[in-house]
Structures are given as structure tokens and as C-alpha cells.
Amino acid sequence: MKTALVLGATGGIGGEVARTLVAHGWRVTALNRKPEQAPRIEGVTWVGGDAMVRADVVAAASGVDLIVHAVNPPGYRNWGQLVLPMMDNTIAAAQASGARVLLPGTIYNYGSDTQARLTENTPQRPTTRKGEIRRQMEERLRNAGVKALVVRAGDFFGPRAGNNWFSQGLVKPGQKVASVMYPGAPGVGHAWAYLPDLAETMAQLADREAQLGQFETFHFRGVWDADGTRMTGAIGARVRAFPWFVVRLLAPFKTLFREMAEMRYLWQQPFELDNARLVAFLGVEPHTSLDVAVRNTLTGLGCR
């Protein structure tokens, strides 16, 4: 039985990958500072430890085949102080154990001057602070000499609330959806990733360890909303413009709004992920129809 350590299993993508790996027959351990208070995930064993403490990560990763690095500071806060040290701790654990690191990637790595269709070979020229941090995360993985797998995707959504635009911007968990605040510019495409499909993709890739190279990157296409109306249409509520003017006004005083304002360009121009390499490797990209995915998401968030 293959074994995996998941960092960030209380988050949306980390928890989903943990559940999916269990379903694929993996033995899964998850790290948490207070394991006795961690949510119960069927088949997942919680161990005590902090992703910011290198010794904790190295000890938890001893003997595992895969380290899922899905840990992020909540609410966009303290990225500069926390993200890269946590990445370095995961790299140290992979060097000690020989495990492959699985990193859920984003499109933050690509700046506002990037072409609309993104392949794995598209140059990464970030124009934001968070984008540069994401670029450095991948660069450190590549230069560390560890086995790594980066799966890049668009904005997350899924039945379990997390730190994402869908559950914190478009709708409000626990409330019936009367209207949707859509942050995108009219007619501009946007990439979405349904978490159960993305996690299934990652698990299938991890299952094929023998076919993977030292450093692998794949793009997950997910749901491509070509003009910004597919997602709001599937939600089926009145659409209102997102109040970006409020974000701009509060950005100097609120960290969350400052970070949101910095990433606004991702809603003002299209970034479409080309999954040709992924399809060639797996044969097909796991996909749930948008209507079903949105229905599952709204039900899981308590909006139905």
C-alpha cells in the first residue's frame, strides 16, 4: 500500500485530495497542530505537528511515498513570511524520505502580459507579489533535486467550503442564493476547477509514479467559462457586478482587500489552461458536468 502525507488537509483542495487518495487505496496521514480537534475524514490518520516546523514535517513524512503540499495561510495573510518557509520544510522532508511532492498549482505565476492560452511551457513572468511567490515555490522544487508533480488549475469550487472565490465571493455559505456577485469583466473568459475532479486527476497521476519524470507539470482544464456566463447561469440567480470600487477604497487598510485588488487582472483578461499534455498522459481528464458540479457545491455549502 502506498502512503501519503497531506499538509493542509483541513483546506478545500487538501481535504479533497486526502479523501480521493484513500479511495484509491492509499494510506493517508495528515498533519495538524491540534489533531484532536481536526475534522474526521474517513481513512485519514491525523498526527500532531506544524507545517512551519521543519522537524515536524520531516518526522511526519518518514517512510511516505507522497507529500501533498496543500497548505496555505488563511485569508491571503502573511504570504511573504509563511509560504516559502513551508515549501522549504516540505522539500527537506522529501529529501529525507525520497517522497514525491505534489503541489496544487495556480495561474498566479502568469502575469498580465501573458498569452491567453497557457501550456506547461508558457514562460512565467508574474506581475504580482503572490505570483512571484508561487513562481519561487516551483523554482525551489525544481532546483532541490526532489521528485515533484505540479498540477495547475483555475479557481477552485466544490461542496466543501474553502478559501476560494466561489464560496467567499459569488455566494455566501449557509444562505440561499438570491443573487450572485460576479467579479469578472463582461465577456471575459475564466477558468474554474471543480475540486473532486481536480483531486481525482491528482490521484490518477500519483498512481502512475513509475511513468512520471523527476519534475512533472500538468495543466488541468476544468471548466472553461468562455464569456463569464456559464458559471452564473448554472447557479441560476440574478447577477450583480462585484463592488471593486469598495475593494480599492479599503485596500490600504485591509490585507484581504489589498490582495484581492492585486489579483484583479485575472478577472479582466482570459487565462485558459491547455490540458493536451494531461489528456495524452491519462487518456481523459476527469470531468463532472457544470450543472451537477454547481448543484453539489451549493448543496455542500448549505445554499440549497
Image (cartoon, rainbow, N blue to C red):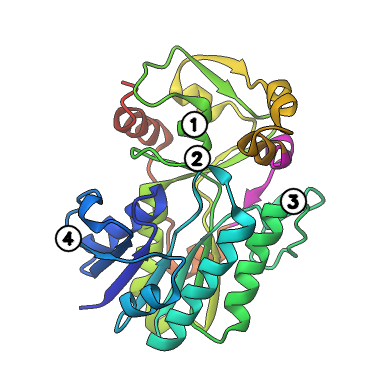
Q: Where is residue 36 in the image (x, y as percent from the top left)?
A: 20, 55
- Return the disc, 4 or 2, that comes first in the chain's sequence: 4
Which residue is painted at 53% across and 42% down in the image? Answer: 75
- Return the disc, 4 or 3, that comes first in the chain's sequence: 4
- Circle 2 residue: 164
Q: What residue type is labelled 1?
A: Gln
Location of residue 292 by image quarter: top left
Secondary structure found at label 1: helix
- Return the disc, 3 or 2, that comes first in the chain's sequence: 3
Secondary structure found at label 2: loop
Q: Can you name the residue that lies furthest to the right here?
A: 113
- Quarter of the image containing the N terminus? bottom left
Q: How far apart are marks 1 and 2 (CA)?
A: 6 Å
Look at the image and give the residue range highlighted in magenta. 262-274
Q: How crowded is mark 2: few (under 14 residues within 10 Å), some or many (20 or more)?
A: some
Which residue is painted at 66% across and 41% down in the image? Answer: 259
**17 magenta-colored:** no
Location of residue 160 by image quarter: top left
Q: Do the residues labelled 3 and 2 touch (CB within 8 Å)?
A: no
- Circle 3 residue: 128
Circle number at residue 43: 4
- Circle 1 residue: 168
